[in-house]
Image: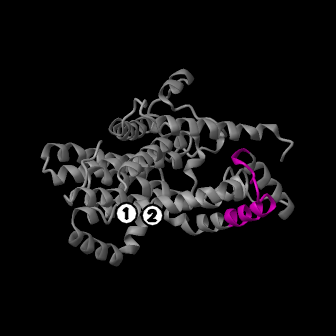
Amino acid sequence: MLKNISYILVSIMIIGYWGLYVKTLSKESKVSFKQYRWLIIFGGLYSCFIGWATKWIHFSNFAGMLTGTVLFGDTATQDNTRLTGCFYNPNFNMYLLLLSLAFLLAETLIAIRKKQSLSIIWHLPILFILSFGIFDTGSRSGFAVMCLLYMLFLIRLNKTAFMMIAIVSLLQFKRLFNLMPRSALVDHSMNNRKQIWEFSFKLWKLHPVFGTTPLGFQQEFTKLLQLTYKKIPHSLSDIPHSHDMYLGAITEYGIVGGVPFFLLLIVNFYKYLLLFIRKIKPLDEYFMFALPVCILTGIFDEPLFSPQIALISIFLFSFWRSYTDKKSIIRFKIQNQLNGSGKYLKKAI
């Protein structure tokens, strides 16, 4: 592995990500959180419409580059029945659409509380389009996360309605399961995932300190398969990542990168839980809906493997860091005691 100089590109990529993260945190950043979330919402809409348009319209290579519909990589393995949109993989498109849905659900929840009828009316068709787009990606994990987002919406809106719908959903679980895209392939997919996870863990034990790097994973994974099988099963050929973000953290970055990742995960999970015990603030809702998309989609897939998705997510993590630094629960309590007012400070959106 140390002989492959191309793997150093991963370090350069991480430095670039870090620079973008720090720049977004700085006061000189020209992108506000409000601009970001609406760009994500309309980006999700665009990805839906351009993806559906490619099924009816043939774009030239030049037009495809302008619209983001030119596919890179092994185009022979692309599944044209699934909505790819402006991504080269339907699972990556699913991530963008879920993030768009999360932000719009937060917008809708706030509009309901403020009784803004006009906003609610034009939000509804967009929610339907994004939801149908997620379904059309054919992603089972995307469908499950979408359902969880809607359940979270009900919890925040009306706990009684949530309990009633949750009970009905449990009673009708089999029917809901059959509604899931490609539900007939769940057993096959899970067996395949299990094999990928087992070999990924073995791969980490071979490279425990620094991992394989994202660029080296596929090559090292194939080498391990060749030592195990005389003929590599088709379902395990050309595996680009471990299909689990948490396993991928240690497999691709080793202990050096994996341990800090899990420490950051624990700290931010604690911060996320604090949102439930504080007074409801408008910005709380956006993060409460958006952050689970990052966490839950990483269980059965690894969408952050894509630089497209990573760039989108870095902005979200930067805004989240900035918000939690300013809106610390502990800081609120100290300020309240000093002021004796018992009120929270006004937020800056």
For this view, does 294 lie left or right of residue 273?
Answer: right
Q: Identify the residue shown where x is 52% and y is 63%.
A: 266
> Which residue position holds label 1?
274
In the depicted structure, whether residue 166 falls above or below residue 20: below
For this view, does 349 lie left or right of residue 60?
Answer: left
In the depicted structure, whether residue 25 falls above or below residue 338: above
For the residue marked with disc 2, what is the amino acid?
Tyr
Q: Check contact, mark 2 vs mark 1: CB within 8 A.
A: yes
Q: Is residue 198 magenta?
A: yes
Task: Measuring from the top left, give residue 155's x and y in whole percent.
Answer: 28, 66
Quadrant of the frame with the C terminus = top left
Observer-nearest residue: 297 or 319?
319
Q: Residues within 10 Å of mark 1 (few under 14, many from 20)?
A: some
> Can you tell which quarter of the image residue 57 is in?
top left
CA gap, disc 2 and disc 1: 7 Å
Task: Measuring from the top left, give residue 184's x and y in whole percent.
Answer: 52, 66
For this view, does 18 lie left or right of residue 201?
Answer: left
> Which residue position holds label 2?
270
Q: Main secondary structure of the magenta part?
A: helix
Q: Identify the residue shown where x is 52% and y is 38%.
A: 22
Give the colour scheme shown.
one colour
For the residue marked with disc 1, what is the amino acid?
Leu
Question: Is residue 83 in view from this perspective?
Answer: no
Q: Identify the residue shown where x is 36% and y is 40%.
A: 33
The total of numbered circles placed on residues is: 2
Specify the segment rendered in magenta.
195-215
- Is label 2 in a helix, a strand or a loop? helix
For this view, does 238 lie left or right of residue 67?
Answer: right
Question: Is residue 130 in view from this perspective?
Answer: yes
- Is label 1 in a helix, a strand or a loop? helix
